[in-house]
Image: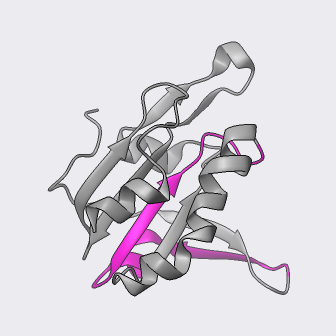
Amino acid sequence: MAPIAVGDAIPDGTLAYFDEQDQLQQVSVHSLAAGKKAVLFAVPGAFTPTCSLKHVPGFIENAELLKSKGVDEILCLSDGSAKYTHALGLELDLSEKGLGTRSRRFALLVEDLKVKAANIESGGEFTVSGADEILKAL
């Protein structure tokens, strides 16, 4: 499958998260992004060094600035099953490291479900998918 690209519509999918009461919730990607400007960024694995020390903190530190530039939603994807990652065409095979199929590191700027910027890393790099690069695209 070809990787998602600028101009493509993001696929729908069901994401899960734990709410403030530690209850598992499910939500569709389209319900979060339809009619909105959203950033969807992904990390290959929760709590891996680059993810937890650089990628995620960059979006947390720049959340207010992103919102001041019109971003309604900032969504972080850590897709252990790679189901949504596959729908995006952004799988990364980390079997040799014992992690199986994961998501490539990326950041998408999406407006009403259409990709406006697709910052997709090669391998395990962290050069184009940070919050600073999304800010440049706004």
Q: Is residue 17 above or below residue 41?
A: below
Nearest the eye: 130 or 47: 130
Q: Is residue 122 above or below residue 4?
A: above
- Residue projecting furthest to the right: 22
- Residue projecting furthest to the left: 7
Q: Is residue 135 left or right of residue 105?
A: left
The C terminus: image quadrant: bottom left
Total count of labels: 0
User: Which residue is found at the position 50% from the left and 72% from the top?
Assistant: 74
Q: Is residue 44 above or below residue 11?
A: above
User: Which residue is found at the position 51% from the left and 28% from the top?
Assistant: 92
Q: Is residue 37 left or right of residue 86?
A: left
Per the image, is 29 magenta?
Answer: yes
Residue 2 x/y as whole percent: 25, 34
Residue 30 x/y as whole percent: 37, 74
User: Which residue is found at the position 85% from the left and 79% from the top?
Assistant: 22
Quarter-wise, where is residue 4 in the image? top left
Q: Is residue 114 above or below residue 69?
A: above
Residue 78 x/y as whole percent: 62, 51
Per the image, is 41 magenta?
Answer: yes
User: Which residue is found at the position 43% from the left and 35% from the top?
Assistant: 121
- Looking at the image, what colour scheme do you see? one colour
Q: Which residues are magenta?
A: 22-47
Q: Is residue 90 left or right of residue 3?
A: right
Quarter-wise, where is residue 109 in the image? bottom left
Nearest the eye: 57 or 108: 57
Quarter-wise, where is residue 1 in the image? top left
